[in-house]
Structure formats: C-alpha cells, structure tokens
Image (cartoon, helix red, strand yellow):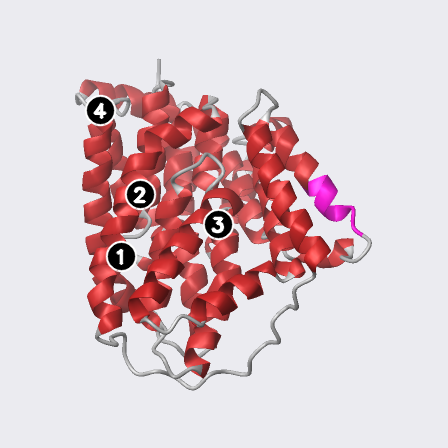
Amino acid sequence: MGSPPLLPLVLFVLTYLGLALGRIPGLALDRTGFAVLGAVAFLATGAISVEEAKAAVDAPTLAVLFGMMLLSAQYRQSGLYSVIGGRLTRMEDPRALLLGTIVVTALLSAVLTNDVVCFALAPLLARSLLASGRRPLPYLLALACASNIGSALTPIGNPQNILIAQSLHLPFLPFVLACGVPVVLSLGALYVFMAPRVAAGGGGPASPPAAAEEPVPLHRPEAAKAIVLTVAAIALFLSPVPAPLTALGVAGVVLTSRRMHTRDMLALVDWHLLALFVGLFIVGRGFEASGWTEAARGALASAGADLAHPAALVAAVSLLGLLVGNVPAVMLLLPYVGRQPSTGYAMALASTFAGNAVLVGSIANLIVAEQAGRLGIKLGFREHLGVGLPVTLISLALAAGAMLLW
C-alpha cells in the first residue's frame, strides 16, 4: 500500500500554520479566514467532495453552541449582564471584587459558554473600573482566566467541551463530577495568585475611559425568562433528552419574544466562531479521507505514543493548544484518542486549562484583549503571559492529580 497523496497534507499543514500565525502580513485574514480558506482548498482540489464536506460538519455540536449563544444573548438584551457587572464593580474591597469577578465569571461560563460571557462582561467591568479610577487590568486578566477554568466544568461551557461531549457521547452529570474538583481548586489557585496584585493596585496605570455605552436597562420579565430557561436547560441536559434538541429548544423560546427582535438577537450570535468550526470540520475530514490520519496514528503507535493515555494526551493537547488554540487542537487530536469517558474528561480539562497559558491559547482571551484595547487598556502577550502561564501550570498539575483518581 502506497503513501497517502501529498496535496492534502500540504493543505492541512498550511491551514494549521495559518491558525498558529494568526495573520499574513499585507492581508486582513484572521484564524477563521484560514479555516474557511483551508476548507475551500480541500473542495477546490477535489481532496473532498461536497457531499463528504456536508457529512463532515457536526450539526449536533453547532446546534448546542448556537443555542447557548442565543441564551447568552437573552441575558445581554434583558439587562442581566449589566446588572451583574454593575453590582460587581460597586464592591469597594479589591479582594472582594476579585473574588466576585472570578466566581461570577466561572459560573456564567459553565452554562453560557465562556466566549460570549467574556464578550458581554469584559467591557462592562472595564468601563466601571475606569470610571471609578481603579486599574482594570488585573481584574480583566482574572476574568479571562476564570472564564476558561470555569467553562471546563460542564460539557456546554466552551466550544471544545461541546465538541468532545458530542463526539464521545459524554453525559452531563458524570462530566461535571469528573471535572468539578480540579476546576474548583484551580479557581481557588487563581484567586490566591491574583489577590496580591489587586491589593497592591498593580496592573499598570489606569487609562481614561472611552465613550461609554449605555448599560442595557433591566427588563424584569425578559430577565426572568433568561433565568427560567437556564434552569430548564440544565434540567434537560441532565435528562435523556439529546443536548442538541435541548439547545435548539432553548433557542426557539429565546426567539419567541414580543420585545426582542429576531434580527437583534441573531446579531449577537458569534457566526465567526461557527464558521471556524465548519471550516475545520471540513479540513479535518479531508485530511482523514486522504489516509494521513491513519498513517499518523500508525506512526504514533510505532513510536510508543498512545494518545489514549491521559498523560500523553494532556501533553499533546496542551502543547498543540499553545500553537493553534484549544479549539483547533481538540479538532485535530480527536481522531487519535480513545472513546473512553476518562479520555474525554482529560482532553476537556487539559485543552481548556492550557488555553490560559498564552494570549492566543483561547478565543476567550482574545475577546477580553480586544475589548480592553477598545478602551485604551493594554492587554498584550506579555501582560497575559505573566498571569496566564503560572495559572496554567498550577491548574494542569491539579488536573493531572484528579486524573489519577478516575
């Protein structure tokens, strides 16, 4: 049997190289653009057919992600996010504000996906802190880290967890029980690490606030609807009802509104992220259909590297996540791992925790940095690394300890 064709390997490597670099000088391409171009290249060269591409797109994963994005939009449009952000920043004690930021962000991220939570909370928190003369940077760093750590708790907390849970058919409650201890301990470690920074007023000089957006006023009936939908969604996720059906049901109820226009709600969905998923699904299937996935699996087995083993998987997903981000890393490694639940839990924890290491490690980090930049707050690679890398090492060590008990 001959070697697989070279062209799919070249297209695959170029796509993931683009994801790692994030840009090409002279072009306005971003990571989603690279994923979509990679998918187009696989289709245009005949490496994958249109029918195969359609079959490659994991509709259940996209359905869960879409539904939770719309639930988060309900929180935003009802004014709940504004209320939460306002109450947080009214705390006078810096340590209390830090603790509140970590706990609230983690809890919201566990049920509403971390990316959309960061998109909503980061500007509210930053503007309020700037207006009160406090330095927002340490709190924004804590928010980014807490959103990643907290989202690891559930199979709906972030895009990669949704993908892992749908691919490996992991039930909601066992997932939470397996990941709960390392998540809670990691959040505690984040607080201990950040508390001296906020108490000392660290984080660089405060910047003058940009033109503030008017906070969304609280609309109690819509806020009550958001909370009821959240409780109902969690109850259904714990039941035998399929997660995609639950998420789409939630989306349908969100869109059935007398006050919130469908166009406005759909405008808050992160179509950019959904397009990234679609592109990478097609690229991954084209790579697999070419025979390279099987060849790589054989090469790893010959070298004694078994990605079904939690230790090897944690190392692989963490290192790859540093290069291309946690979502692409999970999508790349899923074909090589076993189907045991413990493998899925290990991949979810490692990919999510490792996303804190560098700024480009997760989309949530980039969202917080982008929102900070719009307000004149510098949150670049260096600022993030000083917090993200130590927190990542601690949380990965805690995750490894938990894996020994599974």
Q: Give the CA distance from mark 4 to mark 1.
A: 25 Å
**Magenta span: chief secondary structure:** helix
Q: Give the camera-side residue of 83 and 386.
A: 83
Q: Give the CA distance from mark 3 to mark 2.
A: 14 Å
Residue at (37, 49) in percent of width and height: 148
Tell which circle, 3 or 2, labels the residue nearer the N-terminal end. 3
Tell which circle, 4 or 2, labels the residue nearer the N-terminal end. 2
Residue 372 falls left or right of residue 306: right
Residue at (19, 33) in percent of width and height: 401
Residue 184 numbered tag: 2
Residue on which the image places disc 1: 191
Tag 2: residue type? Answer: Val
Tag 4: residue type? Answer: Leu
Residue at (49, 38) in percent of width and height: 156
Residue 273 falls left or right of residue 396: right
The answer to whether residue 255 is magenta is yes
The span shown in magenta is 251-257
Label 2 element class: helix
Residue 382: quarter of image:
bottom left
Query: Picture coordinates of residue 140 (x, y %)?
Result: 37, 66
Tell me if residue 195 comes above or below residue 400 in the rendering. below
Residue on which the image places disc 3: 108
Label 4 close to label 3 by CB (< 8 Å): no
Q: Give the CA distance from mark 4 to mark 3.
A: 27 Å
Query: Picture coordinates of residue 80 (x, y %)?
Result: 59, 59
Tell me if residue 181 comes above or below residue 269 in the rendering. above
